[in-house]
Image (cartoon, rainbow, N blue to C red):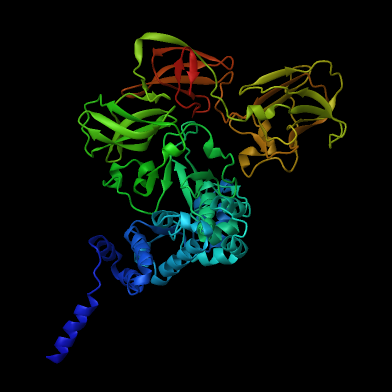
Amino acid sequence: MRWILYFCLGVLISSCTVYSDEIEDVLRQAGKNRKELEKVLKHYAKNPADSLNLRAAEFLILNMPGKYSQYSEGQWNDAATVYYRWENLLNRPLALDEYDLSDPVRKDDLKYITADFLINNIELAFKVWREMPWGKDIPFDVFCEEILPYRVGNEPLENWRKKVLASFADFYLLFKNNESGITAVEACCMVNDKLPRFVLHEHFPPMNYSQLMATSRGSNNHKAALAVFVMRGLGIPVTVDITPLWPLFPSAGIVWNSVRDSFGVHISFLGTESNPGMFHGALLFNKSKVYRHIYADQQHIANDTSHIPPLLRHINNLMDVTPEYSSCSNISLSVLNDHKNQTGYAFLSTPDKMEWKAVACGTYEADSIHFLSVGNHVIYLPVYYYNDIQTPVSYPFYLEGDGTCRIFRPDTIQTESLTLFSQPSFFWSANMKGGKFEGANQPDFSDAQTLYCIKTDPGPYFHTVSIQNHVRTYRYVRYITPEGDICVVSIIEFYDENNQKLHGSILGESSSGWFNSNTKSDKAFDDDVQTCTGARPGNAWTGLDLGNPKRIKKIRYLPFTDGSGIYEGHVYELFYWNEKGWNSVAKKMADSHLLHFKAPGNALFILKNCTIDKVISTPFFMDNGVQRW
């Protein structure tokens, strides 16, 4: 009987550690890995001096469900090789299979994370928080979100904090001693200047710190992730911010970083590219919503993912920070359609070509829906979402700067005459200002003569230039970018005195072309309005060897418009939105860079180029006869 007494006493002692219901629920989800998580909790619970560390451990564990690594079991150098050539691969499935990269592996942190890994992360996070002089200005809750987390996204786990402190030991000692009074923002600038400059590449998988430092290729997501790893490793509070869909860039969201200063203000920057206080691309244009990635689970939405629009399926780990970046308004809307709200949530969608994608979540009351901090100067469509089906519940509207909603309820009786232009093609036509067309008889253009100089922004459409007073003949012809500017030209055509289009061998500086097969030197001569010859700043050029000297009497050129312009001979279809969706107004062939239609009044429109099967604009409306996108 005595052994039974000892056994019962042992069980009683071992069960003295009592967890909150929330922690206990997470531990149950961990299954066999529960013991690893309990090691962490017991490690800090046994010493009262570690009470803050215990709270940090509880924070990480409590919010661990849903966090995971995703990667291929093949060697990383194989993955880097495949993705380096991704744009040009003829058979992507074959390449993935050859390198054992076909089936990404998912490993949930709850099931696989170890106690040693978590303890190491917590210890080093506290170390830099306490040692950095700006740490005193970082509250514990901010520390938990902006320094403590052991991962950024779904990258493979590694002990990156040790590696950061080893690789950036010079900065660590400088900041720790802080003889010159360096602030967190200044430290962020100094470190960001030393991060590798990335080549833009969209197809790399989630990467950890070591992979990012070794690869230096990736998207803005990867740039932002690297900045977070290094900055947090040095105790600098840095976040990842995102707008899920940019209204003026269909199909694109954008990611950047922010660093918290000693007054609690977040200052935006982009890791590896631009420092706090400097301009970067994410600051351009109006934004519907801006969110900050956080580690904690907010439980904004309790429904399963089939009731959550795709862009918002991580909403429970996003904090709405729209007021930090955009003028915004709180709005309430009446529900016009007799549609049952089966989830209790309402959403706001913004246009993505001819689709609508939800970017904001609101609340529902009787016959009205409500949204907080919605970005002004953006077009929206109120929707419900249930079982992966999105249903419009009112007409689209434009949110004015004063918070009023301009609702687009089309009037098919009172029609209006529309004169349509191309949507402005950001940057590109302006970058041809100062560019020159030249002729020469030496292949190095050492005897080049200027045929025509572009003196003003040519605009996003075809231009035809007659060459006057040029009686000389030239074997070599080219377009050369303005000195120190970006080269982006879509189409170049040279004609002789008989109005015959000239052909020849493609010429061009080796620097011509970005890392993309659609921007090489030959793309200016492929008659495709969707491609271009593109080159980074410098005296890059593209041209032709005509084989024999020819007299040049005419040049026709098109700045890069990504196929989104209005071109002579192309057929276009205009659509307007009503309660049933997009409806065709008419089709027309363009005879210039303008189009003319009769269409319903007070409508929202979108334009498609049927010749190249491409929606060429974001939705627009007419304001006193002028298009507004």
Residue 287 occupies quadrant: top left
Q: Position of residue 66 (x, y in %)?
A: 34, 56
Q: Position of residue 516 (x, y in %)?
A: 61, 43
2 over 252 or under it: above or below: below
- Decide if residue 139 is on the left or right side of residue 420: left
For this orientation, the residue located farthest to the left is 1
Camera-side residue of 481 and 568: 481
Q: Position of residue 494 (x, y in %)?
A: 74, 24
- Decide if residue 454 is on the left or right side of residue 46: right
Residue 116 occupies quadrant: bottom left
For this orientation, the residue located farthest to the top is 414
- Decide if residue 260 is on the left or right side of residue 511: left
Asked if one can make out residue 587 in the rendered structure from this viewpoint, the answer is: yes
Please identify the quadrant where the N terminus is shown: bottom left
237 over 509 or under it: above or below: below
Camera-side residue of 146 and 559: 146
Camera-side residue of 449 and 186: 186
Asked if one can make out residue 505 in the rendered structure from this viewpoint, the answer is: no
Q: Position of residue 373 (x, y in %)?
A: 37, 35
